[in-house]
Image (spheres, grey):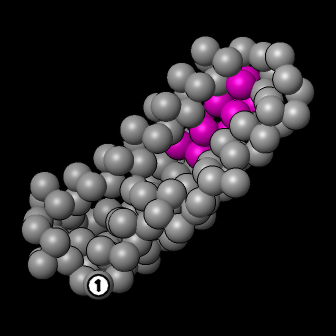
Amino acid sequence: MNPERDAAKSNLLLGFLLAYMVGSFIHHFHNAQFVAEYPNMPGGFPASVAYFVWGAATLVGLLGYYFARRGHELLGLGAVGVYAAYGLMVLGHYKLAPISAHTTGANVTMHSSSSPQRSSSPP
């Protein structure tokens, strides 16, 4: 094992996780505060649910990173994979209504939450 390479891979993973966490938080915040901008969402959607879901999903990602760094790579990367799959679920908003039915703000936060790697470049 090459410690320098492992550190670089770990830093890259951490960078992607942090980018996704920020994008995901912005989307969940937007969901919580502007739920009316998301067509066909259930009425009476409490803001606390959006924040709780973000926190629970983020915990999965952070635990995945922690376990991967501690040598439990299968468990850690599995959790990171679950976290990444959750990020793609945000596109489910488009199953409820087409892109054109959402506001620009809703579309921007959904895309930032599902694809932070567009703004990130590998070292």
In magenta, the rendered stretch is 57-68
Vertical order, 73 against 23 (above or below): above
- Packing grade of label 1 (10 A; few <14, some 14-19, many >=20) is few
- Snapshot quadrant of residue 8: top right
Quarter of the image with the N terminus in it:
top right
Label 1, secondary structure: give it: helix
Vertical order, 73 against 6 (above or below): above
Q: Is residue 51 left or right of residue 106?
A: right
Viewer-proximal residue, 7 or 80?
7
Q: Is residue 13 left or right of residue 38?
A: right
Q: Amino acid at mark 1?
A: Thr
At horizontal 10% and vertical 68% (from top left) the residue drawn is: 98
- Answer whether residue 58 is magenta in the image: yes
At horizontal 27% and vertical 55% (from top left) the residue drawn is: 91
Q: Is residue 98 left or right of residue 84?
A: left
Viewer-proximal residue, 42 or 89?
89
In the picture of the structure, the residue carrying the numbered disc 1 is 104
Quarter of the image with the C terminus in it:
bottom right
Question: Where in the figure is residue 50, as x and y percent of width and height?
Answer: 45, 58
